[in-house]
Structures are given as structure tokens and as C-alpha cells.
Image: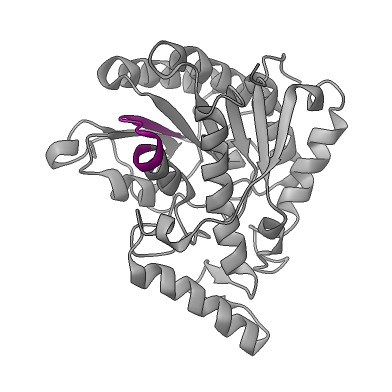
Amino acid sequence: MAHPTALVLHPDCARHDPGWGHPEHQGRLPAIIGAIYQDTPALIEHVLQREGRLAAPAELLRVHTPEHVELVRRAAEAAQEQGQPVFLDADTVVSAASWDAALAAVGCAITAVELVLEEDAASAFAATRPPGHHASADTPMGFCLFNNVAVAARWAQAERGIGRVLIVDWDVHHGNGTQDIFYEDPTVYYLSLHLSPHYPGTGSAHERGAGAGLGTTRNIPLAPATTAEEYLRLFRGALDDAVAEFAPELVLVSAGFDCLAQDPLGGLRLEPQDLHALTAVLLERARPTAAGRVVALLEGGYVPRRMGEGVVNVLRALAGLPPK
């Protein structure tokens, strides 16, 4: 019998080191693990724990250009040789271990999807870094090296015959990379709720896809004053529309925890318990066409304690447990 949910990790993800002064620092994953184990035994006994694998470069090439992949690899080599990180832009840093960490982040995303499609777990959460949703097919940016959720979606399609993938992005920042990758693709529906105006400046409501993909992008820009109740109402409505129009076979979540109140890079008002409610709605809406298959991948979140509380609530919802 399948476990209610799975937690996928890899030790190399903790080795990505942009520096402790960087928001996406090495303290993020330990905060998540600590919060999960503080909820023991109520949570852990419901969760299948698995170590992910390193993605193969060929798997990255389903989404990224060879030049993009080589840029990240060479930057990690240069960081090793120089003894200090390499900046790809003002925000995006590659350390000596970042190549391995990035492969582990993508590999964990794939492992999480595989566990669910093989019915080892009904749902899954991949606690990984660096994040991914700002990375486009040819450009790392916004703390992101490779687009983890995009590669996982393509893996599900190429390796398991999944026809339609819904990607739900609740990170406070618009996932411009994910949108760009799938903007003309009718087989992947991208739904984003994000603060606006805010970095990276994309994600307006009129951006709906193009060509064969017209109608499979949905953006819901949010004002800072948006309440949790209004957020949940908009989330339910947009999700209902996506399921009715698209009938997804798999639901992936770019789970950013910078949507929580008090995040220094955020500006919304959600609390950790609100993410339990969002996840529960996702599970319910995913049942008719996707057999409840929901896989969440860590994106942003820059107050480690709050992020840990948020992840616990997402995992509790995936496991069928009440919020905490």
C-alpha cells in the first residue's frame, strides 16, 4: 500500500553555498528538517523518506540549452579553482559544490515524481536547493540554476507517458522561467499567484500563453493587502478553471514559502496554516483527473523558522493530517 506522502532529500543540496549573507543560504534545509522532526512522531510515521539521485545532464537538456548547462558546470569549476563563488548575475551565485547541488535538486524532483507515478507514495515533497522557477531554457537567474519543476514535468512526459501536467506556483515571485519554457506548449498548464508589482516584473494577467499554448498560462497578480481569505478564494477559482479546462494527469507545485508574512523578500500575509489549506484544496482538485498525484518542490522562503513551519503544514496536508 502506498504511503500517504514522501519526503525526498539529497545531502548535496546543502552544499550549495552562496554565502550566509545571501537570502538563499545553507541554513534553509536544516530549518526544514528540524521542523519536521519536531513534529515527530505525528508526521514522520506517515512519511516515506527517500534520498533522491543526481540528474543526468541529458535530463537537463529536455528543458535547457547545452550552453546553459555548460555555463553552470564551468562556473562551478571556476569557483573551485578560485576558492570563491562566481556570480552569474547580481543575485545568482555558483559555488564549488553548486553543480552537484543543482543536479541533486533536479534529481530529487524527478525522484519525487517517480515515487508518485510508481505508486510508492500518493504524493511527495522534495526539499531541495537551489530553487528553480526563475531559470529559463537558456538563462540562470533569481537564485536559480536549473528549472527543477520544468525538468520534472518533461521527465514525467518523456519517461512515464504523462500527457498533461499542471504546474501551480505559489511562490511570492512570478516564475518567469517556468512560464517562458512552457508558454507555447499546450501540454503544460502554468498557474501562478504572486505579488505584483514585484521581482521579476513579469506575470501580468494578460499573459495567457501563445500559439498552441494560448490559454494554458494563468497569472493572478496580487496586491500586498490581499488577505488569506481572498487568496484562498482566488486560488480555488483558478484551480477549478484549470482542472475543468485542462484535466491534468499530474500536478506539480512550485512551493515557495516567501509567500508567508514576515518574509524579507515577500509582502503577502499568508500564515503556515494557510498553506495547509492550499495543499488540501490541491489534493481534492487533483483527484478526478490526476488520481490525487501532487508533487511539491521547494522554491523560495527566506525566514528559516517560518519556512520550516510552512513545510510541516504542507506535509501534514499531503499526509492527511490536520494543520499545526
Residue for point 41% across, 60% down: 58
Kindly indicate the quadrant of the structure image that contains residue 8: top right
Q: Nearer the viewer, residue 2 or 314?
A: 2
Image quarter of the N terminus:
top right
**Residue 297, image x and y in percent?**
56, 40
* Above or below, comparing residue 279 to residue 222 in the picture: above
Q: Give the range drawn in magenta.
A: 157-168
Residue 95 is drawn in which quadrant? Answer: bottom right
Q: Does the magenta stretch include residue 317?
A: no
Residue depicted at x 36% and y 15% = 240
Residue 89 visible to the viewer:
no
Asked whether, in this view, residue 144 is left or right of residue 221, the answer is right
Question: Is residue 163 highlighted in magenta?
Answer: yes
Compare residues 242 and 160 and report the one nearer the observer. Answer: 160
Q: In this view, does 310 lie above or below 304?
A: above
The answer to whether residue 230 is left or right of residue 62 is: right
- Residue 148, image x, y percentages: 48, 49
Q: State the residue in front, 163 or 190.
A: 163
- Is residue 121 depicted above or below 172 in this figure? above
Q: Is residue 98 visible?
A: yes
From the top left corner, tell me how far across and down residue 323 is, in percent: 71, 18
